[in-house]
Amino acid sequence: MQNIGGGNTMVFNNAARNLLREAGENKSVITHDWWAYMVVTGCGGHVFYDSKPTLRYRQHGDNLVGMNSNWAARLKRIRMLFQGRFKHWNDCNISALRTLEHRLTPENREILQRFADARGMSLIPRLIHLKRSGIYRQTLLGNIGLIAAAILGKI
């Protein structure tokens, strides 16, 4: 549901590289790093997160994607939620992951199916299936946003 690392911070072993090559080029995904994270973890790869910074992340006014750590950025993301942008992102990610469904672990295949199914359900079943899918975000505010998106049918 959420990427935990920027593409410029990722290092892949040969197994991950081969998997990403098998996934193919020109997938209609939102960001390459989020896509790589979903593919590798969805297919059973292990991600090792090193919390020690080893580079300086340069933020500037022309960044396409920012850190979203201040209230202005959070308000922008709320607007994006209401505009349906996250729903569209999920549409793209689900569609792209379906092309690799045969490589997903059985557990992750089930999570993908539950999440995809839940999105088209009425409110109470949608919330129940979303909870049962096990998806989550990394922060309390992120999880509140996820629940709000589900309630509003914007997931």
Image (spheres, rainbow, N blue to C red):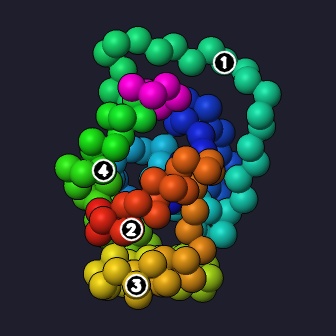
In the picture, the quarter occupied by the C terminus is: bottom left
The residue pinned by badge 4 equals 81
Q: Which of the 4 image quarters holds residue 31?
A: top left
Q: Mark 3 or 4, which is nearer the eye? A: 3
Q: Tell me the CA gap for discs 1 and 3.
A: 44 Å
Question: Does residue 116 lie above or below 43 as drawn?
Answer: below
Say which residue appears at 61% left-offset and 50% top-offset: 140
Q: Tell me the CA gap for discs 4 and 2.
A: 10 Å
The residue pinned by badge 3 equals 124
Say which residue appears at 57% left-offset and 18% top-offset: 57
**SS majority, magenta:** loop
Q: Secondary structure at mark 3?
A: helix
Q: Mark 1 or 2, which is nearer the eye? A: 2
- Among the two numbered marks 3 and 4 on one chain, the one whose residue lies closer to the N terminus: 4
Circles 4 and 2, Cβ within 8 Å, touching? The answer is no
- Amino acid on which the number 3 mark rests in the picture: Ile
Q: Residues within 10 Å of mark 3 (few under 14, many from 20)?
A: few
Q: Tell me the CA gap for discs 3 and 2.
A: 10 Å
Q: Mark 1 or 3, which is nearer the eye? A: 3
The disc placed on residue 150 is: 2
Circles 1 and 3, Cβ within 8 Å, touching? The answer is no
The residue pinned by badge 1 equals 55
Q: Residues within 10 Å of mark 2 (few under 14, many from 20)?
A: some
- Amino acid on which the number 4 mark rests in the picture: Leu
- Among the two numbered marks 1 and 3 on one chain, the one whose residue lies closer to the N terminus: 1
Q: Residues within 10 Å of mark 4 (few under 14, many from 20)?
A: many
Residue 17 appears at what percent x and percent y? 57, 52
Say which residue appears at 45% left-offset and 53% top-offset: 145
- Among the two numbered marks 1 and 4 on one chain, the one whose residue lies closer to the N terminus: 1
- State which region is magenta: 66-72
Q: Mark 1 or 4, which is nearer the eye? A: 4
Circles 1 and 2, Cβ within 8 Å, touching? The answer is no
